Amino acid sequence: ETSVAAALKEGVRHVDTAAEYGTEEAVARGIRAAAVTRDDVFVNLKVAAEDPEDLRRVIDASLKKWGQGAVDCLMLHRAPEKEKNLEELWAVLEEEVQTGRAKMLGASNITAAQLEVLTSRQRPESLWPAVVQLKCSIFHQGGYFIENPSALWRILQTKRIVPVGISLFNPLHSCISPLEEPLCRAWAQDLCCSPAELLAHW
């Protein structure tokens, strides 16, 4: 709550939360504490499950905790273990757009092949992933889940999913701390900033 409020007061306007993080209520409180209007903040909520009924329960519980009406982007946190379940889970997310509880859909930790499935011509473009969130760091510049970076960019371009829709989150995290990486420290020193500032701008 405190971190969200402080970030919003500094001008941040995109907040990420997830059922698995258990931060929905804290994010809502942080927005209220920052005294910013809800319409000025883009909130995406990530949800995941292995079957449609479980996903519906996760969504219902998460939106209840959030308690601020529709979320800007309802995002599939990760693809199911069984590939054949992907379309069924996505159909559950589509229902949330159609009922007005989500304004758009997104996908996190997704491969280029899975993105192809979700952007098939049989699906209305309004129900394609509008946001693709991939975990990147200086050690994983293609993204942890991108087996073919050029294929992903090709899909984003041809399917008109604008590149700004990619959220490269958590650049400070890796198995080896980038903050301690000698090259990062040297670049930061040359630029008169901290390694954290350098990575955040990267």
Image (cartoon, grey):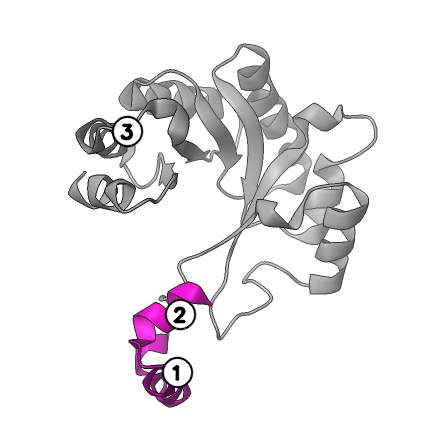
Per the image, is 197 magenta? Answer: yes
> Quadrant of the rendered structure where residue 130 is?
top right
Dot 1 or dot 3: first in sequence order is: 3
First to last magenta residue range: 175-202
Disc 1 marks a residue whose amino acid type is Cys
Q: CA distance from mark 1 to mark 3?
A: 35 Å
The crowd level at tag 2 (other Cα within 10 Å; few <14, some 14-19, many 20+) is some
Camera-near label (3 vs 2) is 3
Q: Quadrant of residue 122?
A: top right
Residue shown at 43%/65% (left/top)? Answer: 201
Label ID, residue 199 = 2
Circles 1 and 2: CB atoms closer than 8 Å: yes
Q: Is residue 44 left or right of residue 162?
A: left
Label 1: few (<14), some (14–19) or many (≥20) C-alpha neighbours in 10 Å: some
Task: Point out which mark residue 45 bears.
Answer: none
The percent position of residue 156, horizontal first and vertical second, equals 72, 48
- The residue identified by callout 1 is 184
Q: Secondary structure at mark 3?
A: loop
Picture residue at 72% right of the left edge, 56% below the top = 153
Q: Name the residue: 50% across, 63% down.
A: 136
Residue to which mark 3 is pinned: 36
Q: Is 86 located above or below residue 173 in the figure?
A: above
Residue 36: quadrant of the picture = top left
Residue 183 seen: yes
Residues at marks 3 and 2, CA–CA distance in whole angstroms: 27 Å
- Determine whether label 3 and label 2 are within 8 Å by CB: no
Amino acid residing under circle 2: Leu
- Residue 152: x percent and y percent? 71, 55
